[in-house]
Amino acid sequence: MDAIILAAGYATRLYPTTKDKPKPLLNVAQKPIIEHIIRKIDEIKDINKIYIVTNEKFQEHFSEWLKNFDAKNPIEIISDGTKSNDDRLGALGDIHFVINSKNIDSELIVVAGDNLFELSLRDVANFFSKKKSNVIVLHDVKDFELAKHYGIVEVSDNLVVNFEEKPISPKSTLASTGIYIFPKKTIELIKKYIAQGNNPDKTGSFIEWLHKREKVYSYITDKKWYDIGSFEQLEKADRHYKTKS
C-alpha cells in the first residue's frame, strides 16, 4: 500500500500565519501537524512509501523539514507545480498527479494534511482488508448546524449512498475526515474521473461519483478529530494534544 498526504493547499483562511508557512507544518503540541499524521500512517504494516504532495511555493519548506525528521517509512516530497491558490490542482487533481507521475498501481491510502485524529489507521486498514473495497472514514459531528461546514455522507448498511459538500440542509451528521483507502482497481477509476472532466477540487466529488459505480464502505469513528480550518480549531487541537504529551 502506498500513502498520499495532501499538502498542496494555500490555507488562505489562516493568513497571515500560513502566508509563508504551509498549514501541515504548523505546530500542535510542539510537533508539526504532518508528523502526527505520519505516525498514524506508520501504524499500518505494509506501507511501501509515503508521498507528500505540495506546491511549488512550499516544496522547499517540506524538504527542509524532512531533513530533520526520523522517518520509519520512505517519504518523498512532490510539487504539483502550482504557485498560487488560483492555479491549484485540487485534492483529487493532486491524487491523480501523484498516481501518474509516480506510476502508482497499488492499494492507496489518502489523508488530508490538515487533519488530526486519534483513531487507529491500523484498524481502518484491517477493515479495508476485510471489505476489499473503497473505504471512507467518517466522524459523527452530532449537530446539523455544524454539519453544514463539512462534506456530509449518508450511509445505508455501512455503504455510502450520498455525499454532499457543505450542504445547506444536511441529511446526516456524518462528516468526512479526509481519510480514504482505495483498492488497486480504483486507480483506473480516478484516471477515468479526471479524463471525463469531472471536478478535481474535492475528493468528496469523486466519492459521490464513485459510490454509484463501486461499493464505498464507511468506517465511522467516535475518536477525537480536528479539521484544522480555523485558528479556533488549531488552538483546540493544540490544547488537547498538549494534555496527551
Image (cartoon, rainbow, N blue to C red):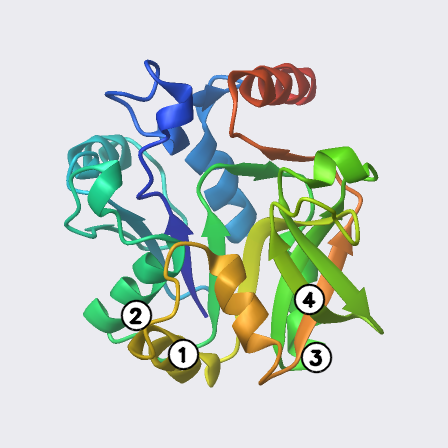
28 or 193: which is nearer to us?
193
Q: Is residue 176 left or right of residue 170?
A: left
Identify residue type, mark 4. Answer: Asn
Q: Are marks 2 and 4 in contact (CB under 8 Å)?
A: no
Q: Secondary structure at mark 4?
A: strand
Can you give x and y, in whole percent of width and height, for residue 138 in the image? 70, 53
Q: Nearer the viewer, mark 4 or mark 1?
A: 4
- 3 or 2: tag closer to the N-terminus: 2
Label 2 belongs to which residue? 99
| Mark 2: few/some/many CA within 10 Å (<14, 14-19, 20+) | some
- 3 or 1: tag closer to the N-terminus: 3
- 1 or 2: tag closer to the N-terminus: 2
164 or 93: which is nearer to us?
164
Q: Nearer the viewer, mark 2 or mark 4?
A: 4
- Marks 4 and 1, how far apart at CA: 21 Å
Identify residue type, mark 2. Answer: Ile
Which quadrant: the C terminus?
A: top right
- Marks 1 and 2, how far apart at CA: 8 Å
- 4 or 1: tag closer to the N-terminus: 4
- Marks 3 and 1, how far apart at CA: 17 Å
| Mark 1: few/some/many CA within 10 Å (<14, 14-19, 20+) | some
Label 1 belongs to which residue? 187
Q: Secondary structure at mark 3?
A: helix
Q: Is residue 55 above or below residue 96?
A: above
- Marks 3 and 2, how far apart at CA: 23 Å
Can you give x and y, in whole percent of width and height, for residue 120 in the image? 67, 50
Furthest residue in direction front, as rendered: 168
Q: Is residue 81 above or below residue 226?
A: below
